[in-house]
Amino acid sequence: MKDRVYQNFEVVDFTIFKTKMLNWMKPFSISCLLDNHLYQQKHTRAEWIAGVSQSTHHSHLLSPQYCFQELQHLHETIPDWYLGHFNFEANQQQPPEHPVAFPVAHFFRPDTIILLKDNQLTIGSIVADPAEIFESIQASAPSAAAAEPAEVEIRCIETKETFIQTIEAIQQHIQRGDCYEMNYCTAFYAENACLDPLALYLAISASNPSPFAAYYRYFDQYLISASPERFLQKKATVLRSQPIKGTIQRAADQQLDDRLQQQLLHSAKDQAENVMIVDLVRNDLSMVCKPGSVKVEEMMALYSFPHVHQLISTVTGELENEKDWGKAIEKCYPMGSMTGAPKKTVLALTEKFEKQPRGLFSGSIGYLQPDSDFDFNVVIRSILYNKQSGYVCFPAGAGITIYSDAEKEWEECELKIANIKKVLAP
């Protein structure tokens, strides 16, 4: 195994450098940028982490049912940086096929890793001199968003009427006591789309910068994500999950925006969702954490983003056995904010009611570093695109409780994809 060589560099304008770096990444068939858009959040490892690979020898397709254990074995064999993803169906024995066709689970050991932390740029490479890579990036032209948004015909996989009927059917299960809350996802899509994924990422980032954003390429499959949500982080022995439940639009008028915040904070439906998901996350973490160590650090804290306000809770726990970090991901997956409670029941209902497999949507993308610390997001507010087939989709989820108004849940789904629609079909 060739050792990774690191070097630090001085950069005057990180925004321009990032666009140059993205342009430099374009020729690589496997690449990833994890971007927090300089949000000043606690517990963040870096402002961005980018990795590229030219060699499929460093690219690993993991088996669906055992992907978490295989990732840990991979890291134990070569302790290094790994970037990649898990589809929502990653823990199923025979996952259904999704039209965009991302692998069920894929991680790669990047030839080159690039990090920005506290205004310090670090390049680590196993294939070239970091100084040569830095000069190559500096020589790249800054990428720019397309002058005109792409024009595609957007459809939904179901009608509004079908959506409402499905929500009402789910509420019958809740009424019977089968479950307490369920996240139901629908999908908007277009066919025969000819898109520039990088231009899309830059356009969406400009209008909706988010702390867990990602630009990810696996050959002809692309993820363009403006996710605001952390799934699971490990720092030393501390596990941290930050489920989001509760969303409301923002207003340009400050007084109206303040009223909307208060409306969200006092929403019985959103409070019920958040409490149930926090309990589910606590239960998940308790299976791998030291007894008594699982705590709720924040309960329904209000976070504001460019287009929406959201309620975010923070749950932490101390990993009982640091060598079981793969098991920790497995026990928490898929994330409670995108399933509901109890998890086993709602996963069966998801398969029954949803019109399309989720694939990478509501799955996770993130990194694993040499010391086995990791951070994974929840893939929401995202575009999935297959450049070869031209199929593009951007699903949205609604948290259904007994208090849910099906009409308003449809409106919330439309709110969640409004920024994407604006970019794709103005």
Image: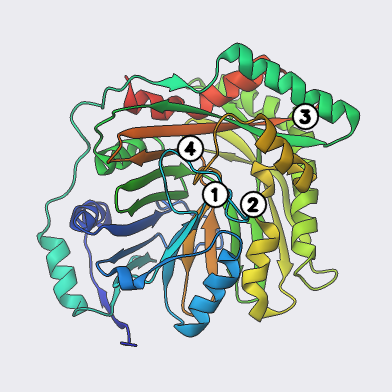
Q: Which residue lies under the disc numbered 3?
A: 401
Secondary structure under the numbered disc 1 in the rendered image: loop
Task: Tell me the amino acid under the disc marked 3.
Answer: Thr
Q: Which mark is residue 334?
A: 2
Is residue 233 at all visible to an observer of this figure?
A: yes
Mark pair 2, 3: CA separation: 19 Å
N-terminal-most mark, 1 or 2: 2
Task: Tell me the amino acid under the disc marked 4.
Answer: Arg
Tell me which corner region of the image, top left, top right, bottom left or bottom right, holds residue 135. bottom left
Q: Is residue 135 above or below residue 181?
A: below
Task: Tell me the amino acid under the disc marked 1.
Answer: Gly
Secondary structure under the numbered disc 4 in the rendered image: loop
> Left or right: where does residue 276 sit relative to residue 3?
right
Task: Tell me the amino acid under the disc marked 2.
Answer: Pro
Is residue 373 at all visible to an observer of this figure?
A: no
Q: Which mark is residue 363?
A: 1
Instruction: State which mark lies toward you, 4 or 1.
Output: 1
Q: Position of residue 143 (x, y in %)?
A: 18, 46
**Proximity of marks 4 and 1: CB atoms separated by less than 8 Å:** no
Secondary structure under the numbered disc 2 in the rendered image: loop
- Which residue is at a point 49% across and 78% down the rendered structure image? 75
The residue lying toward the viewer, choosing from 362 and 409, is: 362
N-terminal-most mark, 4 or 1: 1
**Proximity of marks 1 and 2: CB atoms separated by less than 8 Å:** yes
N-terminal-most mark, 3 or 1: 1
N-terminal-most mark, 3 or 4: 4
**Proximity of marks 3 and 4: CB atoms separated by less than 8 Å:** no
- Which residue is at a point 58% across and 29% down the rendered structure image? 355
Q: Which residue lies under the disc numbered 4?
A: 381
**Proximity of marks 4 and 2: CB atoms separated by less than 8 Å:** no
